[in-house]
Image (tube, rainbow, N blue to C red):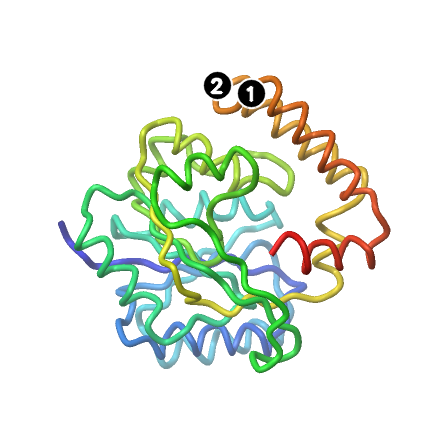
């Protein structure tokens, strides 16, 4: 297999230019450099963001821009970007996160050692402000069997630090419209299709958070979308009817809590 790889990013106008710069710097400072970086511009951007992109385009000919005329949402933007990825291995990267220097090298090494894998992800460290202020570590189980079972309760893959085989994602139908849960639904469909998963038992990425993160992970709209996902997982045979009812009932309460309380629960109990 060709071990060259692409990095897939999506950028929209609300992103911070400083965070974008830090993210790109972390990509181009890797111990194993990507063979291309596909940056989807999800709709028109601010001049400040365009200036950061222009600066990196001058320095790195491996940076490719895929412009979208209008903001289409993360799932649609990633599907379009995936079409422009030249290599079978694709690493996801959000434009406000910071990859640790050996992230890509460690993930490619795992693929080389276990070529039957379709997905290799890892733990992430959530930070506020700068990377010296770690709020929590999002740990996930290691082996495929553990991941398969864990996924019946919670999302088993940290999307911002995932590296996957393009063909396996396309086989499962790619990212499909599912408000706030496009990635989780993709992993479930891939697990059901027989794709093999692995989580490196170490943090390979700093994940930027703010109080807004907890707002996005709560509220009635979020709770209803999560319930819809649980129903879909039951329908395709991934979870039992009892598990579906249990998950909806227990999660609904947390999702509709006030933002501050939900943030405390998320940090202290869910981690």
Residues tagged 2 and 1 counted as in contact (Cβ below 8 A): yes
- Count residues near mark 2 (Cα–Cα under 10 Å), then give few for <14, some for 14-19, many for 20+: few
The residue where tag 2 is placed is 237
The residue where tag 1 is placed is 234
Q: Residue at 61% of width from left, 49% of height from top?
A: 70
Measured as percent of width and height from the top left, residue 6 is found at 31, 58
Measured as percent of width and height from the top left, residue 244 is found at 62, 24
Q: Quadrant of residue 248?
A: top right
Measured as percent of width and height from the top left, residue 83 is found at 36, 45
- Count residues near mark 1 (Cα–Cα under 10 Å), then give few for <14, some for 14-19, many for 20+: some
Taking the view exactly as shown, the residue that stands out farthest to the left is 1
SS label for mark 2:
loop
Q: Residue at 49% of width from left, 37% of height from top?
A: 151
Q: Residue at 25% of width from left, 52% of height from top?
A: 87
Q: Quadrant of residue 138?
A: bottom right
Viewer-side residue, 169 vs 209:
209
Drawn side of residue 112 relative to residue 185, left or right: left
Q: In which quarter of the image is residue 232?
A: top right
Q: Quadrant of the C terminus?
A: bottom right
Measured as percent of width and height from the top left, residue 68 is found at 53, 51
Q: Residue at 68% of width from left, 59% of height from top?
A: 268
């Amino acid at each position: 297999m060709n071990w060259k790889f692409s990095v897939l990013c999506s950028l929209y106008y609300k992103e911070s230019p400083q965070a974008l710069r830090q993210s790109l710097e972390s990509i181009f400072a890797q111990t194993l450099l990507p063979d291309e970086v596909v940056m989807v511009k999800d709709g028109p951007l601010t001049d400040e963001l365009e200036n950061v992109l222009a600066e990196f385009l001058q320095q790195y000919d491996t940076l490719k821009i895929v412009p979208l005329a209008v903001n289409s949402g993360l799932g649609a933007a990633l599907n379009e970007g995936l079409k422009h990825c030249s290599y079978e291995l694709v690493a996801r990267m959000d434009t406000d996160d910071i990859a640790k220097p050996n992230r890509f090298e460690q993930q490619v090494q795992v693929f080389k050692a276990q070529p039957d894998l379709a997905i290799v992800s890892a733990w992430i460290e959530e930070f506020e402000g700068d990377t010296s202020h770690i709020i929590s570590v999002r740990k996930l189980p290691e082996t495929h069997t553990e991941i398969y079972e864990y996924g019946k309760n919670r999302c088993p893959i940290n999307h911002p630090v995932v590296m996957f085989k393009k063909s396996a994602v396309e086989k499962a139908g790619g990212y499909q419209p599912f408000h706030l849960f496009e990635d989780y639904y993709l992993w479930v469909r891939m697990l059901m299709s027989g794709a093999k998963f692995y989580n490196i038992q170490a943090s390979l990425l700093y994940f930027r958070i703010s109080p807004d993160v907890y707002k996005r992970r709560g509220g009635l709209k979020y709770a209803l979308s999560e319930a819809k996902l649980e129903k879909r997982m039951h329908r395709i045979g991934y979870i039992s009817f009892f598990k579906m009812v249990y998950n909806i009932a227990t999660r609904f309460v947390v999702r509709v809590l006030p933002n501050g309380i939900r943030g405390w629960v998320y940090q202290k109990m869910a981690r």
